[in-house]
Amino acid sequence: MVNNRDDLDLMPFSGADTEPVEWRIASLPVPYPDAVAGMEARAAAIAAGEAHELVWLLEHPPLYTSGTSGHDTDLLDARFPLFQTGRGGQLTYHGPGQRVAYLMLDLKRRRPDVRAYVATLEALIIRTLAAFNVKGERREDRVGVWVARPDKGPGFEDKIAAIGVRLKRWVSLHGIAINVEPDLGHFDAIVPCGIADPRYGVTSLVDLGHPVTMEDVDVALRQAFEDLFGPATARATDMIG
């Protein structure tokens, strides 16, 4: 069932009266506790008017995270560290070959609407995938972005990107994760996002036959971001400060 968030007006998030968002790309995998500490500090500074908004692109070493709706029983094999986190959602995997984008945006200035913000993140992913001729879709009962897999059978779909969001003083934390070329076998150790239906799996751009690089995805992601959220400006350093 296609999600009715398709009908939401997303353009108010463009933030016409905001300054360009800082855009940073980490050159090395970032440990999860370091990423959370960096996000928390930056979000607090944004809320206090002491820092610009930021989009931070990175990869993590292999790990699992559990959101506010996570269940212990969804961890089937503790092969990697598990981190409890304040984002929404359940269990998911992060690791090399997955583009994680953490967005620290001032929604109080842009648009204080959580539902519309999540829909805009979905649109961000869908537009990024479209650059590689991949049709990503929303679903009414499942957050994230999905790809139909008729080659696997009727009603089969795979998740290609996840979304997890937290707000503090109307500044967003966490964000999205797009599977570019991760080891999909690492998802076997969890019930991804609590979805156990065998018709619903996990895929990636490379798994779908699109041998794109992380750099290719970053270019498409930035274009889609600027279309939806407004201009971004790159920083020379990949460290949060």
Image (cartoon, rainbow, N blue to C red):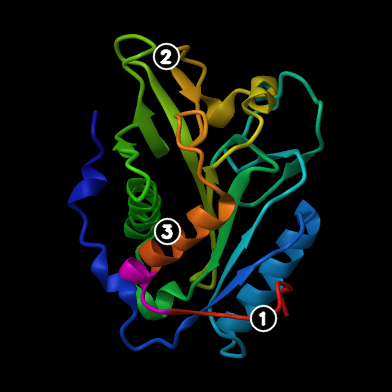
Determine if residue 210 is in view: yes
Q: Nearer the viewer, residue 44 or 204?
A: 204
Q: Classify 10 Å Cα crowding around label 1: few (below 14), some (14-19), many (20 and above).
A: few
Q: Are marks 3 and 1 in contact (CB under 8 Å)?
A: no
Tell me the quarter of the picture where residue 35 sits.
Answer: bottom right
Q: What residue appears at the point 40 percent right and 79 percent down from the top-left corner?
A: 231
Residue matched to label 1: 236
User: Which numbered dot is residue 199?
Assistant: 2
Q: Are marks 2 and 3 in contact (CB under 8 Å)?
A: no
Query: Which element is circle 2 on?
Result: loop
Tell me the quarter of the picture where residue 147 sits.
Answer: top left
166 shown above or below 2? below
User: Which numbered dot is residue 220?
Assistant: 3
In the rendered structure, the answer to whether residue 34 lies left or right of residue 137 reads: right
* Residue at mark 2 to residue at mark 3: CA–CA distance: 29 Å
Q: What residue appears at the point 46 percent right and 14 percent down from the top-left corner?
A: 197
Q: Are marks 1 and 2 in contact (CB under 8 Å)?
A: no
Discs 1/2, front: 1
Q: Which residues are magenta?
A: 226-231
Residue 128, image x, y percentages: 39, 52
Specify the quadrant that holds the N terminus.
Answer: top left
19 shown above or below 12? below
Label whose residue precedes the other's in the sequence (2 or 3): 2
* Residue at mark 3 to residue at mark 1: CA–CA distance: 20 Å
* Residue at mark 1 to residue at mark 2: CA–CA distance: 44 Å
Secondary structure mostly taken by the magenta-highlighted segment of the chain: helix
Query: Which element is circle 1 on?
Result: loop
36 shown above or below 42? above
Determine if residue 173 is in view: no
Which amino acid does the dot numbered 3 rest on? Ala
